[in-house]
Image (cartoon, rainbow, N blue to C red):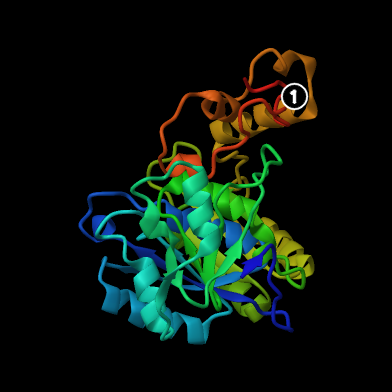
Amino acid sequence: MASTASGLPPGRSVTAGIIIVGDEILKGHTQDTNTYFLCRTLRSLGVQVCRVSVVPDEVAIIAAEVTSFSSRFTHVLTAGGIGPTHDDVTFEAVAQAFGDELKPHPELEAAIKALGGKGWEKLSLVPSSARLHYGTDPHTGCPFRFPLVSVRNVYLLPGIPELLRRVLEGLKGLFQNTAVQFHLRELYVAANEASIAPILAQAQAHFGRRLGLGSYPDWGSNYYQVKLTLDSEEEGPLEECLAYLTAHLPQGSLVPYTPNAVEQASEAVYKLTESGNALMLKNPSRSCMSAASPLSLSWSSFYRTPSRGTICRCCRLKVT
């Protein structure tokens, strides 16, 4: 069954569990960056991530974790274990978790054939109750060539970070919880954490469950010693706590600081390309240039947009 969106259950609280699949993570061969991106993105969509698990490439272990997570959380997102090789067993494990059989899906067979995907036929073998979700690349407006597979409330994402990010960005609507918006403020304090601990304890006791107050020391910064995070579903308590801390923290200890300044500058440049600014139209973006490059079938082919001969919405240039 194909789908472009899924309904959310009634009520404000929408939760998620994340299962990272891969021996390479547990053995320290590969650094996991998917967890950070998934948690950050889901939080921005009003979804509370409650648990993250890392499991090996073993069918029984993956299946047991999927069964447990599926019964406890609104959404379950797996990352990894999808591909053409012997250790790609996530589809098989999810089928086992729900008592399904692995069967070739006609739409997936057609998609792989259209891509000239000899050797990738394993990707068409999915649980019999699988649903397909066709996303749109937010940077180009072009549809993905290959869908995201889900079974019940479990969504099976690729483990390659670049592809995972692209797929999730193109299918945010599957997880958007409009009933909740999490608000965040960050403060940077040039004071020892122990010296401000009593003030933080008083603030948390006063605001209780209306607000989460986190304290994170940073020994490597020349500008501050502690980062404070204020997190709430409502702006009122957050602003009240901000005022409380401003009044009670040592005078002059709050310092201005812009985290990830280089990343933010890059995002600003990208926004210029989307705005159609004449200065940015002379050169296609990196995504357009890679899309136009000759490429044999690989994972990137499944989510490679736009195709040759189309107009790319990123830079308004024709990809030839």
- When the figure is inspected, residue 146 is found, relative to residue 78, above or below; the finding is above
Residue placed most toward the observer, 11 or 125? 125
Residue at point 25%, 55% (across, down): 24
Residue 189 appears in the rendering = no
Measured from the top left, where is residue 98 in percent x and y? 44, 84
Side of 82 where 144 appears, left or right: right
Residue at point 32%, 66% (across, down): 89
User: For the residue carrying disc 1, how many other residues have a C-alpha within 10 Å: few (<14), some (14-19), or many (20+)?
Assistant: some
Element marked by disc 1: loop
- When the figure is inspected, residue 291 is found, relative to residue 55, above or below; the finding is above
**Image quarter in which the N terminus is found:** bottom right
- Residue type of the residue flagged with mark 1: Arg
Residue at point 54%, 38% (across, down): 304
Measured from the top left, where is residue 159 in percent x and y? 40, 54
Measured from the top left, where is residue 209 in percent x and y? 64, 80
**Image quarter in which the C terminus is found:** top right
State the image quarter where residue 230 is shown.
Answer: bottom right
Residue at point 58%, 55% (across, down): 168
Residue placed most toward the observer, 268 or 70? 70
Residue at the left extreme, as displayed: 27
Residue 126 appears in the rendering = yes
Measured from the top left, where is residue 180 in percent x and y? 73, 71
- When the figure is inspected, residue 97 is found, relative to residue 90, above or below; the finding is below
State the image quarter where residue 176 is shown.
Answer: bottom right
- When the figure is inspected, residue 128 is found, relative to residue 265, above or below; the finding is below
> Count the marks: how many?
1
Residue bearing mark 1:
316
Side of 11 where 166 appears, left or right: left
Side of 135 where 102 appears, left or right: left
